[in-house]
Image (spheres, rainbow, N blue to C red):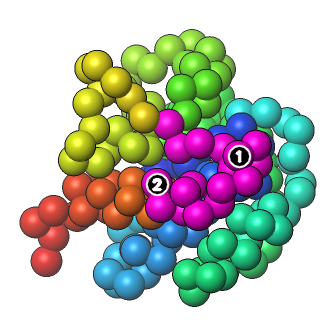
Amino acid sequence: MKRILFVCHGNICRSPMAEFVFKRLVRRAGLEEEFEVASAATSDEEVGNPVYPLAKRTLAEHGIGCPGKTARQLTPDDYRHYDMLIGMDGQNLANMERLFGGDPEEKLSLLLDHTPESDTKHHRRDVSDPWYTRKFNIAWDDINTGCTALFEKLTAGHE
């Protein structure tokens, strides 16, 4: 089983969007038994809060629900439990490295690192935070692109 945790600042916009986009990809492929997918926050600001209404609406516009999801904070145990911990931006990545004391098992990445056009050596691209930009459509495009590329990478050759 592949265990994936999507991470953003508050776990009410980007990371839950990624969680539920990825879960839909898994479900459509009939691979629910092969993946564990969740999301978490680097901060404690939104712990216990539901998915932000505009993020929820953006998911719904694409036929995706997120029932019962509430924000939770990342813990050191998450590094041991998950195979991949995927941040939405460089600050998320820096916060994860600080919490985990680095990345000795190379489990940390940014979502858009998994796209074919990614250049992790020279320029990494963030999923901008729609909480601040109010551009949920742009966040959706980046999240959908990143999740699709990650899913294709992880299931390549899977029949």
Residue that numbered label 2 is attached to: 142
Q: Which mark is residue 19?
A: none
| Residue positioned 73% across, 75% down in the render | 57
Q: Confirm whether residue 85 shows in the render.
A: no
Q: Examine the rendered structure and indicate whether residue 8 appears above or below residue 18.
A: above
How far is mark 1 from mark 2, CA to CA? 14 Å
**Labels 1, 2: front one:** 1
Q: Residue furthest left?
A: 157
User: Looking at the image, which residue is at 61% across and 30% down?
Assistant: 92
Q: Is residue 143 magenta?
A: no
Residue appearing at x 71%, y 38% in the figure: 9
- Number of labels in the image equals 2
Q: Residues within 10 Å of mark 2 (few under 14, many from 20)?
A: many
Magenta stretch, main secondary structure, is: helix
Residue in the foreground of this view, choosing between 34 and 52 = 52
Quadrant in the picture for the C terminus: bottom left
Q: Quadrant of residue 93?
A: top right
Mark carried by residue 133: 1
Q: Secondary structure at mark 1?
A: helix
Q: Residue 103, image x and y in percent? A: 45, 20
Q: Quadrant of residue 104?
A: top left
Please give the name of the residue rendered at 31% of the width and 45% of the height, measured from the top-left corner.
Answer: 114
From the viewer's perspective, tell me whether residue 144 is left or right of residue 43: left
The range drawn in magenta is: 126-142
Within 10 angstroms of label 1, few (less than 14), some, or many (20 or more) residues?
Answer: few
Sequence-wise first label, 1 or 2 = 1
Q: Is residue 121 left or right of residue 102?
A: left
Residue flagged by tag 2: what amino acid is it?
Asp
Q: Residue 22 appears at what percent x and percent y?
A: 46, 66
Specify the amino acid type for callout 1. Thr
